[in-house]
Image (cartoon, helix red, strand yellow):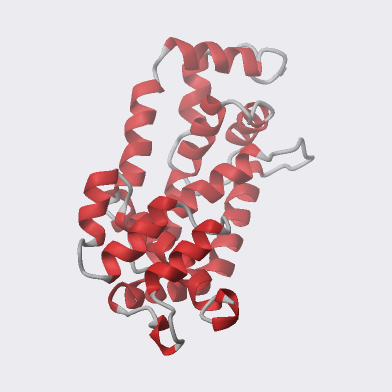
Amino acid sequence: MSIAQATPTIQLLQDEWQRVSHSEELLASVKKWTYRHPLLAYRSASEIISFVVKPSWNRERKRDEALSCILEHSQEPLSQLTVLQSLLPQVTHLIDKTWTHNADEFAAYVVAMATELIAGWKKRDIICVHWWLYRNIQTRVTQNAQTWRKYSRQETQLDDQEIPEASSEPGVSLPDLIALVMQQGELDRLTAELVVLTRTGCLTVETISHNTGLKPQTLRRKRLRAEQRLRSRLSLADFL
């Protein structure tokens, strides 16, 4: 099993597909989507699904014909899930070959990007639909991979890094600074508590994650954005 296939994101995607792949809801939807298409109208829904999600890198006419019909209904969750399943070998390949600090978070990012591309589909005169989708996802991943790796390293470093103390300015403390930013609507209570509790050593990010149900990486991102706002306010002028 590859790194990508072992990530919770891809496993959840696979589990969801297993749940719906033979459901009456999906079969009925596929028949509805392909009903007016002359090359697909007389094929069974299960047959159409089988060659759409066949794990292959080859450019196949039957798959592209079916994908075109399914993508015309790309706003529907079942359509998105079917197209994602068709692209799964290519998606996992991109995740495996791109080194990141957190494989699962990167997998979630790639899947979200692919879903966004699918959901925004407009009817196009494209012969190789499957290949077109893959190449667009690959291009976006390649363009953003370096930024993603840099961002992941930055998050890791910030986990142990102390926020610059405001005590260099007379009368300005971290709680005072946070209270001001909250008052001005730039910081919500959860994020304020996150900064104070983790930076003063009262609680760890993991403990807050357990209590709130939010992922540690999500909390670290929230803290990073909050601290960037706080750093920009480390000026006595804000308190005058």
In this rendering, the answer to whether 226 lies above or below 160 is above
Residue 218, quarter of the rendered image: bottom left
Q: Position of residue 57 (x, y in %)?
A: 50, 49
Q: Position of residue 206 (x, y in %)?
A: 22, 57
- Is residue 75 visible in the rendered image? The answer is yes
In this rendering, the answer to whether 112 lies above or below 79 is below
In this rendering, the answer to whether 208 lies above or below 102 is above
Name the residue: 27% across, 51% down: 209
Q: Position of residue 21 (x, y in %)?
A: 40, 23
Q: Position of residue 225 (x, y in %)?
A: 48, 65
Front-most of residues 42 and 212: 212
Front-most of residues 80 and 204: 204
Front-most of residues 229 and 147: 229
Q: Considering the image in quadrants, where does the C terminus appear? A: bottom right
Q: Residue furthest bottom?
A: 168
Name the residue: 50% across, 74% down: 146
